[in-house]
Image: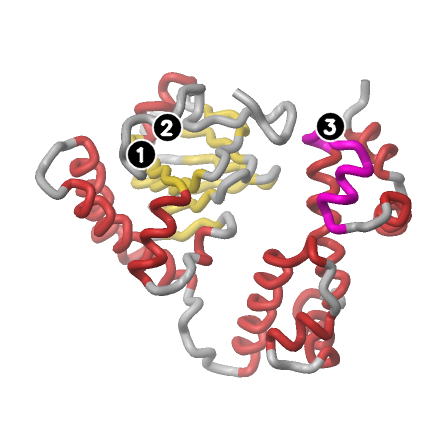
């Protein structure tokens, strides 16, 4: 078992060190099956190149994602992207399933849908609401199909997962036309943040970002200030800073290695940039959060 982030276990499936089980492109099990073995607590860990969907049918789930804790007390689906540090604590009456799959299945799903599954790129929780009964039926069917050995099982599993992804994508409402200017602005900011997530290590100019959104730099900055209280550049810097802090806490990278991984050409400049934003040097920050 290895981890990119020392102190944070990196499992194929929680508590297991062996290779991916079987030949399926996905793994499906009840929440109880694994959590009862660990006294209803799944400690913070990561999955390399594995996506997870936690379906809470009933009961209570405390969810921790990247240090942020929330509580699920009604039927919902929690999305956990790869390499996201996450943990759960469940009530003993918990009911639901955990669906785990890798890049191979994701590529197949995107081919079916004809679009990238951006809904899986960021951790999020989707309450089921009025769709509770329909989603319960879908996921119960998926679990039964997974455990069985009926003809065309793989095709059926992929069809059921596709239906689930369509539901999640619709709930994210990426494809809905904005109803007013405020909603258009929020969607535009969302598009910018997704661009930042995809390219923050490349240190693109604000002109390059604005051109991809087909707006002027002035409009981009006005939009970011109005909705986030920060300039467009500050949002890029905050994303870089988050990644820098995570690596300083969880990895043993040298400052030079970290600087290079974040797209800085000069470790000295990176150190000055970090201190300007935080008031601490990178090494000082590392010592403060990891005292001997």
Q: Which residue is depicted at the point 41% across and 71% down?
A: 175
Quadrant in which residue 181 is drawn? bottom right
Image x and y of residue 256, in percent: 81, 38
Q: Is residue 23 above or below residue 178?
A: above
State if disc 1 and disc 3 touch (CB < 8 Å).
no
Q: Which residue is mark 3?
A: 252
Q: Which mark is residue 27?
A: 1
In-front residue for pair 65/241: 241
Image x and y of residue 270, in percent: 85, 47
Left or right? Give the position of 182 relative to 132.
right
Image x and y of residue 84, in percent: 54, 39
**Nearer-N-terminus badge (3/2):** 2
In-front residue for pair 58/26: 26
State if disc 1 and disc 2 touch (CB < 8 Å).
yes
Magenta residue span: 249-263
Q: Secondary structure at mark 2?
A: loop
């Amino acid at each position: 078992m290895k981890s990119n982030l020392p102190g944070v276990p990196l499992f194929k499936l929680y508590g297991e060190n062996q290779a991916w089980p079987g030949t399926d492109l996905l793994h499906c099990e009840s929440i109880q099956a694994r959590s009862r073995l660990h006294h209803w607590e799944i400690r913070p860990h990561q999955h390399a190149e594995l996506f997870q969907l936690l379906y809470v049918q009933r009961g209570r789930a405390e969810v921790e994602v990247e240090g942020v804790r929330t509580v699920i007390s009604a039927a919902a689906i929690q999305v956990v992207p790869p390499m996201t540090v996450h943990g759960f604590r469940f009530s003993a009456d918990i009911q639901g399933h955990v669906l785990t799959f890798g890049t191979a299945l994701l590529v197949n799903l995107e081919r079916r849908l004809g679009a990238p599954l951006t809904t899986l790129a960021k951790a999020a929780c989707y309450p089921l609401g009025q769709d509770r009964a329909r989603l319960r039926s879908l996921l119960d069917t998926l679990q039964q199909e997974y455990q069985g050995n009926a003809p065309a099982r793989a095709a059926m599993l992929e069809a059921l997962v596709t239906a689930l992804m369509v539901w999640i994508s619709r709930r994210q409402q990426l494809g809905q036309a904005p109803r007013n200017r405020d909603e258009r602005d929020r969607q535009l900011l969302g598009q910018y943040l997704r661009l930042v997530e995809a390219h923050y290590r490349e240190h693109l100019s604000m002109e390059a970002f604005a051109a991809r959104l087909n707006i002027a730099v002035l409009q981009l900055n006005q939009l970011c200030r109005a909705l986030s209280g920060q300039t467009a550049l500050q949002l890029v810097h905050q994303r870089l800073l988050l990644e820098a802090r995570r690596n300083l806490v969880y990895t043993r990278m040298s400052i030079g290695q970290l600087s290079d991984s974040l797209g800085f050409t000069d470790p000295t400049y990176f150190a000055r940039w970090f201190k300007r934003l935080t008031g601490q040097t990178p090494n000082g920050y590392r010592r403060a959060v990891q005292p001997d």
